[in-house]
Image: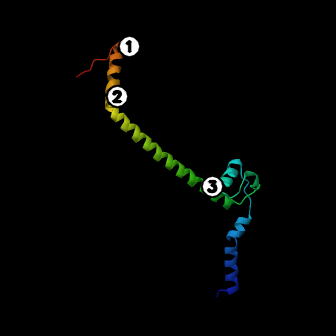
Amino acid sequence: MFNKSALIGSLLRRSFGTTNPLRQAIKNHQPNEMEKRFLVWSGKYKSQAEVPAFVSQDEMERVRNKMRIRLANIMIALTVIGCGIMVYSGKQAAKRGESVSKMNLEWHKQFNELKPEGGAAAPASTK
């Protein structure tokens, strides 16, 4: 029923279009300045002058993914460092006797003292 040569031919045609060397050979993406920097930072090229006018789409996607991962790792590291700084700052404030509740009480005390000076009388509560 099935023609063996037709089956092999269709498999070859199907796999030929998705082979990696062929996809890399098609260089149809023109990188902008930022993408050229990405290509250099990822180690694909030594300088921006060496980056060709057109690169393959697969190459550009791989470089973007590398940069995305690097940026995420940098943001994770900065978040951890920021958390460490906040913990240290909170411990120093606790040693000085500062707390959020004390700051809140002081603010309300100052607010209530300044309120009558504003000239507007507070509405009477209806309890």
Q: Residue at x 73, y 51 (%)?
A: 48
- In the rendering, which numbered label is found on residue 118? 1
Which residue in the protein does label 2 denote? 103
Tell me the CA gap for discs 2 and 3.
Answer: 47 Å
Discs 1/3, front: 3
Residue at mark 1 to residue at mark 3: CA–CA distance: 58 Å
Instruction: Examine the image and state in which quarter residue 24 appears.
Output: bottom right
Residue 86: which quarter of the image? top left
Residue marked by disc 3: 64
Q: Secondary structure at mark 2?
A: helix
Q: Is residue 20 left or right of residue 119?
A: right
Label 3 sits on a secondary structure element that is helix
Mark 3: which amino acid? Arg
> Residue most toward the left?
127
Mark 1 neighbour density, 10 Å: few (under 14) some (14–19) many (20 or more): few
Query: Disc 1 on helix, strand or loop?
Result: helix
- Foreground tag (2 vs 3): 2
The residues tagged by marks 2 and 1 sit, at their Cα atoms, a distance apart of 23 Å
